[in-house]
Image (spheres, rainbow, N blue to C red):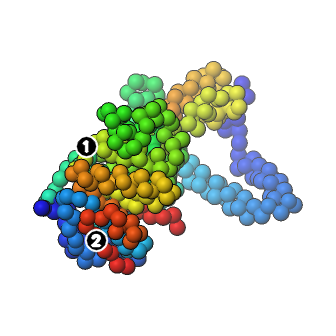
Amino acid sequence: MNDLSGAIGYKDVALAVALVAVGMVISRVRGLGLEKDMAVATIRSFVQLLAVGYVLEFVFDGHGVTSIAVLAVMVVTAALTAGRRARAVPGGAVIAGIALGAATAGTLGVLTVLGIVPVEARAVVPLGSMVLSNAMISAALVMTTLRDDLAGARREVEARLSLGQTAHQASLPWHRRALRSGMLPVVENTKVVGLVALPGAMTGMILAGAQPLEAIRLQLVVMYMLLGGNAFAAVLAGELTVRRLFTSDHQLIRDLRRKPA
Amino acid sequence: MGDRFEYVDVRVDGDDGPIVEGFSARIPSQGLTVMVGPSGSGKTTLLRLLNRLDDPDAGAVLLDGADVRSYDVLALRRRVQYVSQVPVTFPGTVADNLGEGDHAALLQRVGLAPALTGREADRLSVGEAQRMCLARALALGPEVLVLDEPTSALDTESKAGVEALVASLAADGLTVVMVSHDPEQTARLADHVIEMRK
């Protein structure tokens, strides 16, 4: 069977840049002003992925412990990114770090303990990065939604507190909504998978010469893993965010009561 | 007669400097105490310290002689019921808002028809909603009622009704603390006055 693994050289990558050039011409002609961003994106993707490629080659060469180090670096980077997106939440990066670390470790733990995937860098690192990148978006969404909604509803939240409700009870309707908004995109994606888009892991395997059904079984594991990992990250991020937005005496933190600037 | 609350040299910081500073006052346990003063003088800020929606940055607030921070905060908030300036209704019916308790009696006590229990709370007029918020507060059996300008969102007619209600609650033995920016209202209602300066 003719597959594409090993068939693509740097020459082919260089030729593919022609497609970027098409995009840049369009941007230029229509006055979109995106040429520079496209050039930067092209160069960055090349450098970043090449660097990751070398790291992965090194990790897969049997340096087992390094895969944990690689995942740790990814978690920290994702946490900083999510924390920056949710910068209005005090300690956002720490919250994201805990949520993402636990979600990634927990999901990979379940997959390996049940023997669904082997404990090998080749399996654990890419799967971990998929959990992580999805969970990062979810966690950031939960954190920002929760913070903004509680700030917007602070009069109602304080009315509930005034009736003797705990911080948890008083924030429940908004907490629930934030979790839904953080988890819904993955749920929706999972519903239409195969109908709207052929997902990445599967496409990759098919391009590399795997049988479609083989590829689909892996993809199903990936999707279910993402559903679980996302829910885990969303719940943790929501819980920790609520704790940071109230004092231990069930008061909204002053920052939330400030009038929007 | 004793004091219910005492502010002791209280300072509360805002974004740019203190909102109130070096504030001391007593709130007697009997009757209706009105805090009066221009807007921006920190009346609402001071009220929020009574049920610990906020804490002072310096000084203390005493309830029955002990720092409010020494009580369990959730129990404190049930004893000291706070009703905000603009009525906040929760989703659902009036009955949902009132929670447990004898709804008909509660509504009657605040001058609302018991038939309103089934009404969606967001379909009440502002005056009715403000009374319902009072009923919701009374449902918890508080010793103190803290009201932040309870009539400022109301028209003249509902205003007179709510004023009469508040006065009758104070006469029933509740400690009532109320904020007003209206000197005439203060003169009509107050048993005790705390005057604020900007």
A148 relative position to A109: left or right: right
Please state, as top left, top right, bottom left or bottom right, where the C terminus of chain B lies in the image: bottom left
Q: Is residue A226 above or below residue B111?
A: above
Which residue bears the numbered disc 2? B194
Q: Is residue B18 above or below residue B35?
A: below
Res A147 visible: no
Helix, strand or loop at label 2? It is strand
Q: Residues within 10 Å of mark 1 (few under 14, many from 20)?
A: some
Please state, as top left, top right, bottom left or bottom right, where the N terminus of chain B lies in the image: bottom left
Total numbered badges shown on the rendered structure: 2
Image quarter of residue A164: top left
Residue at (45%, 42%) from the top-left corner? B90
**Disc 1 residue type (three-letter):** Gly
Residue at (33%, 54%) from the top-left corner? B166
User: Are the residues tagged 1 and 2 within 8 Å (C-beta)?
Assistant: no
Distance between the Cα atoms at labels 1 and 2? 26 Å
Residue A234 x %, y %: 45, 41
Q: Residues within 10 Å of mark 2 (few under 14, many from 20)?
A: some
Q: Chain of mark 1?
A: B
Residue at (46%, 46%) from the top-left corner? B129
Question: Which of pointers 1 and 2 lies earlier in the amino acid sequence?
Answer: 1
Residue A181 x %, y %: 54, 41
Q: Kindly indicate whether the residues beneath marks 1 and 2 are on one polypeptide chain.
A: yes
Which residue bears the numbered disc 1? B141
Residue at (27%, 57%) from the top-left corner? B176
**Disc 2 residue type (three-letter):** Ile
Residue B148 x %, y %: 38, 60
Helix, strand or loop at label 1? It is loop
